[in-house]
Amino acid sequence: MSNRPHILIFNPDQWRADVVGHFGNQAAVTPNLDRLVETEAVSFRHAYCQNPVCTPSRCSFMSGWYPHVRGHRTMFHMMHEDEPVLLKTLKDEGYTVWWGGKNDLIPADTGFGAYCDIKYVPEKRPRPETNLHAADGWRGDPEGDNYYSFYAGKLEKATDEELYYDGDWAMVLGAIDFIRSAPKDKPICIYLPLLYPHPPYGVEEPWFGMIDRNKMPLRTPAPDWSRKPSMLKGIFDRQKLQGWNEERWRELRATYYGMCARVDHQFGLLLDALKETEIYDDTAVFFFSDHGDFTGDYGLVEKTQNTFEDCLTNVPFVIKPPLGVKTAPRVSEALVELIDFPATVEALLGLTPCHTHFGRSLLPVLAGETDEHRDAVFAEGGRLHGELQAMELESTSMSEPSGLYWPRVGLQQLDGPEHTKAVMCRTRDYKYVRRFYEQDELYDLKCDPMEVHNRIDDASLADVLAALKERLLTFYMETADAVPLKTDRRT
């Protein structure tokens, strides 16, 4: 076979970075990730996505472009055939690419042929994803305080079910089958974008009961809303969770932790399959999420599209290189971005990218040569007034009060300040958010890691603010466009 490594891209949806055991969270049950980081992999404590919702984030980490480079700022602006996608690059380089799970990357009418050899469809039909989203009783009365909570709780298996056979289980089992029957003469790439732990918050046993409720870390309290983005206050009012006591919040959060524990177990099954087929040592493993989740912080659930709290933008990111690539297993403190993922794959494969992108290879950090990678990380979202194409008007089922996502999507479709265009510049110690139509944000993360106290008007931080604004200008100057590598004939 080729001397290029196999690649596993294990990509859960909406997993916040702090829900892993090896970061010191005693309530998190992630033994497979923890063992891997202890022995063979590097986990990045400070890894950040470039947008806090699914499609824009995926467009970034598959292209190496920030959302502003080509306008990938909504759920309905995906990667097109003239745009670079890592999966297509790997397929063109001779990889057999297997894709099982979510899309949220390319338009539905494009087809998958250019991006993978196999877009997996299981023979046995899994439980429909809509089971959790449907009115199965868990939402309760539309006027009640659970209607927009996303809390479903314990999922019950049928008496004849060995597994709660939903889409994630179908894709994981399909990937294991592919590993066992993969071609021997070509490198393989498995792309596994799962749904979990995306809410609704629901999971079956044994994972539901696996989480020790007494070990849950403290929630971030609701702040002074006059100093925070209006989108958050709008969602807070619409979700109607103000009356929840801590016991109810613990159950919701423990269920989310249980969802993460289930994904960790499924990840372990994939690693076992790689070992059984004796290709584990030849495989580069990438584990990362597209964005995080509020999970009760600030009294909120789910996410937003234009606010950048660490619970939304800080994601788990673990890399195990193939055997022979120098690695110092540990938790790295380097500041990294998800757009560094494709650059790292290119470096592993010795590929020269065919487009200008802004990722940076993480191989020197994996080797332990440095923990200095970036001085700042960035995320973007929202829209300008008048950008009707960025209002996500296509989300008709979500923009009605009966829709589970109405508290957020309904606000996105108003022309007030809530869905204002915004950008985050985060360093190790400070976070600055530039916002149109409303107040900017500035947080001293050393003394306020929960980002509760907006100090944008604090004169004592004037020099810090000026430096962050200058850094933001430099960021946009460096990344404002991507000139095609192919030039045009003038005559």
Image (cartoon, rainbow, N blue to C red):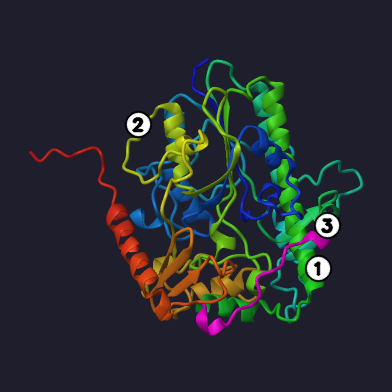
- Real-space CA distance between mark 3 and mark 2, rounded to the nearest whole angstrom: 48 Å
Where residue 212 is drawn, which disc sits there?
3
Image quadrant occupied by the C terminus: top left
In this figure, which residue is indicated by the disc labeled 1? 137
Residue 86, can we see it? no
Which amino acid, mark 2? Thr
- What's the amino acid at mark 3? Asp
Which residue is under mark 2?
352
Viewer-nearest residue: 394 or 470: 470
Asked if disc 2 and disc 1 are in contact, CB closer than 8 Å, the reply is: no
Q: Earlier in the sequence, mark 2 or mark 1?
A: 1
Please state the horizontal and vertical placement of residue 186, each as a whole percent of the image. 52, 19
- Observer able to see residue 411: yes
Is 220 magenta? The answer is yes
Within the image, what quadrant is residue 346 found in?
top left
Q: Quadrant of residue 485?
A: top left
Mark found first going from the N terminus, 1 or 3: 1
Q: Position of residue 373 (x, y in %)?
A: 43, 46
Q: Nearer the viewer, mark 1 or mark 3?
A: 3
Inspect the magenta stretch and tell me whether residue 336 lies in it.
no
| Residue 431 percent location from the top left of the image | 46, 66
Q: Which residues are magenta?
A: 213-228
Q: Is residue 320 left or right of residue 262?
A: left
Residue under the point 59% across and 62% down: 311
Is there a contact, CB below 8 Å, between mark 1 and mark 3? Answer: no
